[in-house]
Image: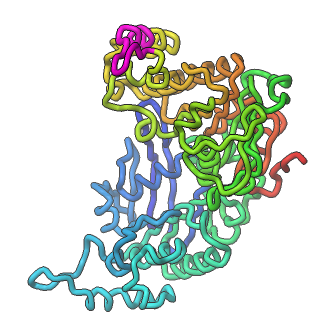
Amino acid sequence: MSLVELSGITKHFGGVRALAGVDLGVEAGETHVLLGENGAGKSTLIRILTGAIAPDSGTIRIDGAARVFRNPQHAQALGIAAVYQEPLVYRHLTVLENMFVGQEICGPAGTVRRAAMAATVLPWFRELDLDTDLLARPMSSLSIGYQQLVLIAQALLRNARIIIFDEPTSILSAAETDRLFAIIARLRAGGRAIIYITHRLAEVPRIADHVTVLTDGAVSGTFSRGEISEEQLVTLMAGKARGHAPLASPRPSAAEAEPVFSVLGLSAPPYFTDVSWRIPAGAVTGIYGLVGSGRSEVALAAFGFLRPTGGEIRLDGRIIAPRSPKEAIRLGLGYLPEDRKLQGLFANKPLESNLTANVLSRFVRAPMRLDFGGLMGEARRVMSRYNIKAPNPLTVIRTLSGGNQQKGLFARWASRPFRVLILDEPTRGIDVHTKDEIHAFIRNLAASGVAVVVISSDLPEVLAVSDRVIVMREGRVVAEGWPRELGAEGIVAAAVGAAEAPRVPA
């Protein structure tokens, strides 16, 4: 019998399906690796397992008993803990305080009994070969690798029997990775169930007892170690994108033209190193890579938000060095951010304010005076052009559907005559119909002569809109070429570092 078993787990966010009837069982004393491309549903599944969100349907069983998690604390009480690639810690508190946060040992007068807390921790620190002197140090003084070990010790302190590791080695050194794997082997030998999420296929034979591949929110298959090859795993991860050809043939005259926008040997460690993108006008260049590949950070450096340490940025053959997004916009660069709620929308402002923010100067009639009638007319024209459904331009944008919010954000950037427009996750979290609309807008924008960059973790999207694709992994460009030339499996293989990954053209 599995220590933890999920049956028929489904989850939707609005009109977007995240999980579709997922079944997963993990036994005590085994490491079960969970693989999947960006957007496959791994993070949603982990949020359900840790009690952060509830499934729409399906059953979770612990030791054979059906459980409904009320909140993350309830999941912890049932023996579930998670260790993430970027540890969730209180950096200003000591290691000991982090270990007991929210569960301090207190005396009768409510005073914290630090000596008792330290004594309780000691057995777990010894099991993980951690020096007890660390307990008094602030968490901020520890490396990421040691912060992860502290969280593992915290999980053991709280009697966790099911420990989830979410991309734990993505920012660890080789020595730290070896140490983590040794600890996971000891945890497994001690009878704990380990769920291990990774995109590094080379780790699978080192650590997995079983591997499950998630594709488009559904289980593509579960296999024992050694039962499936790396090539077969890549094929499963590519999923429906394998048969997804580009919607239109590439425009060779545009895609092979002299680049209007380039980053050459650009570096900003630890995010990316020696990256070169050559972006022609009149074409869509797709940038694909897994989370942490550095794709968004390169765009932010070009847009003046992140300061590079080396390399150069060129626009129309001229070296530029924007010191702020404001300066980048003045130079002719636009950037639609990946998180519309936190980075893009003026959520409590009307649609009119959101649609006209980038062209406001056209409606200034005198100091401190705006042509409000002109702004309303412009907002109505934009709403009509981009099929934004709202009662009127004064509707507060946060009250609209996610798809209409995203079309509004796209329209704001597309309405200004930029030389280069970078679109970071332009269709994340919206329904299929609206996604198709935005794809058509993107292709029309490129056809008008704009150099368009689409950064996306949605492989079918990259194949649908791109004339050329650049693939990034771990802060470097690892492949580039025509979508038909690379193919879905070749793009995924390059992104995960599989042996059969295509090489970057010389």
The residue nearer to you, when weighing 312 against 81, is: 312
Q: Residue at x 65, y 20 (%)?
A: 445
Q: Residue furthest right?
A: 506
Q: Position of residue 241 (x, y in %)?
A: 69, 36
Q: Residue at x 41, y 16 (%)?
A: 364
> Does the rendering let one see residue 221?
no
Q: Residue at x 63, y 38 (%)?
A: 455
Q: Position of residue 446 (x, y in %)?
A: 69, 22
The residue nearer to you, when weighing 49 against 458, is: 458
Magenta range? 363-380
Left or right: 498 as drawn, with respect to 382: right
Q: Position of residue 411 (x, y in %)?
A: 51, 21
> Does the rendering let one see residue 440?
yes
**Colour mapping used in the image:** rainbow
Q: Position of residue 153 (x, y in %)?
A: 43, 79
Is residue 454 magenta-colored? no
Q: Residue furthest front?
A: 367
